[in-house]
Image (tube, helix red, strand yellow):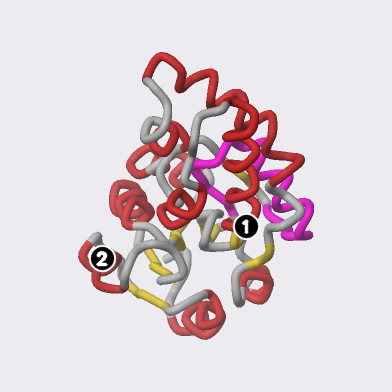
Amino acid sequence: MTAAVGFDLDMTLIDSRPGIHAAYRALTAKTGVHVDADLAVTRLGPPLRTELREWFAEADVEEAVSTYRALYPDYAIAPTVPMPGAVAALAAVREQGLRVVVVTSKLGRLAELHLAHLGMEYDELAGDLFAEGKATALAEHGVRWYVGDHVADMVAATTAGIPGIGVTTGPCTSEDLAGAGAAHVLPDLTGLPVLLGEITVGS
């Protein structure tokens, strides 16, 4: 299997905050339960249920998850844009003869909608995984480096026994990411092509 570079999705490859904000607003309108969308989009990364438990009674969480996911395609896809440097970063991976693998906590079919809408090509996608839960997918798909914006992404890389590359485009600082085990920390993906030229991926 050709070696791969893995990427998280939200706030690593895509800025989904505007779309997720709209989806949370729609969820509030649909259910009558207030979700502070401004606050929720500042802490993207953990699974959807984690956020919804802040607003819904435990007995109502699963129904809220289903309602949100039903609303998501109509509200969250179109407003989402690539993160700075994301398109060039994916191209740089392919120029090195490596595969692109996306491993995200977002449900796979919703992640696919984002990637298709933005024309981002990938080889494999694994969804509905978080922190240590991502490690099996990273190993299964031959990922040698994993790029993410959250400390949980660095935990995923460490658990899989591979180096993590942190980007400070999400809720976590460079200190947070380094403390969680990141081998490298970048301000955003614009620096990834140069870094890929300096490190040995697949060794």
Q: What stretch is highlighted in magenta?
A: 99-122
Q: What is the x, y in percent for residue 181? A: 25, 62
Q: Name the residue under label 1.
A: 18
Vertical order, 27 against 118 (above or below) = above
Q: How crowded is mark 1: few (under 14 residues within 10 Å), some or many (20 or more)?
A: some
Q: Is residue 10 placed above or below 137 in the rendered structure?
A: below
Which quadrant does the C terminus fall into? bottom left
In the displayed structure, 133 sits above or below 102; it is above
Tell which circle, 2 or 1, labels the residue nearer the N-terminal end.
Answer: 1
Pick whichever, 74 or 193, lies toward us: 74
Residue type pointed to by label 2: Asp
**Which amino acid, by three-letter code, is at mark 1?**
Pro
User: Which residue shows up at 26% across the image and 69% down it?
Assistant: 178
Residue under numbered circle 2: 176
Name the residue nearer the viewer: 75 or 106. Answer: 75
Q: How many labels does the image show?
A: 2
- Quadrant of the rendered image containing residue 112: top right
